[in-house]
Amino acid sequence: MPVFPSLRRSHRRRLTRHFLPASALAACLLAFFAFIGFEDLANIVEEAKDPLRDIPRAMVLTLGISTLLYVLVAAVAVSAVSTERLASSSAPLSLVFREVAGVSPATISAIAIVATLNTILAQMTMAARVIYGIAREGQLPLVLARVHARTGTPLIATVCVAAASFPLALFFPLTRLAESTSLATLAVFALVNLALLRLRYRGVRSIGPHVTVPIWIPAAGLATSVGMMAGAFFG
């Protein structure tokens, strides 16, 4: 019995025919943008009662729940609307909402805008904190490590991140920005996994308590990150 019975057999054949490995990797690169931000849980490690236990569990749990929700939304989308209409639509989720609910898609569009802005602002905030931390370690100009006297926030670093973000948002297509952001994040993830593999190979041990994982986890992380990056160029 087909998973999505509302899809005609011709649609399923066409979808299968076009589902090539390279194209799938390229699609994963764009979808990866939706998962950016979960790693920011590491920044609240000092607020956890038992960070060695709670933070890894929180990351796995949030990733699992979000992935399940994305899969369910995708299942509803391809069940309610043909793949041809979804592919030709500039706002496929709004199209699905209109088909299923029978009302204007303005509501789901407003929710999508607010959710996207929230994600972008969160990433800009975290980027400013990263720049502040690097500057405080002396790897960037010390002016970026200054904090506002009243709010205690890295104002100069935040202004620099905003100044770099606004031209990109105004003059570059959203899809290209999402792909570029995913590529940059995947490059960072690949380097982090590579560094972890090198530390394990050299037998380096942490002085304080730390989270340990099997060696195959950073190896798989490095392989998947490089694979999705390769899919962007060959997909």
Image: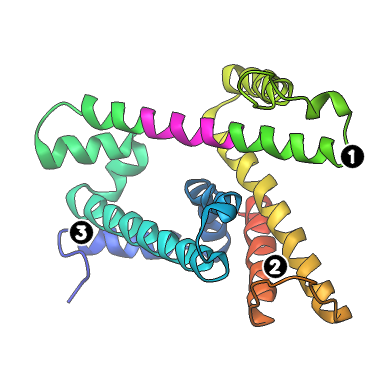
Q: Amino acid at mark 1?
A: Gln
Among the 4 quarters of the image, the one containing residue 163: top right
Mark in the foreground, 3 or 2: 2
Question: In x, y percent, where is residue 144?
Answer: 80, 26
* Residue 23 visible in this rendered orientation of the protein: yes
Q: Are marks 3 and 1 in contact (CB under 8 Å)?
A: no
Numbered disc 3: secondary structure: loop
Mark 3, residue position: 7
Separation (CA) of disc 2 from disc 1: 26 Å
**Mark 1 Cα-neighbour bin, 10 Å: few <14, some 14–19, many ≥20:** few
**Mark 3 Cα-neighbour bin, 10 Å: few <14, some 14–19, many ≥20:** some
Q: Is residue 5 above or below residue 135?
A: below
Question: In x, y percent, where is residue 206?
Answer: 79, 72
Numbered disc 1: secondary structure: loop
Residue 123 covered by magenta stretch: yes
Mark 1, residue position: 139
65 sits left or right of 48 in the view: left
85 sits left or right of 218 in the view: left
* Residue 26 visible in this rendered orientation of the protein: no
The residue at 35%/37% (across/down) is: 88
Mark 2, residue position: 222
Q: Earlier in the sequence, mark 3 or mark 2?
A: 3
The residue at 24%/36% (across/down) is: 95
Q: Which residues are magenta?
A: 114-124
Question: In x, y percent, where is residue 85?
Answer: 28, 41
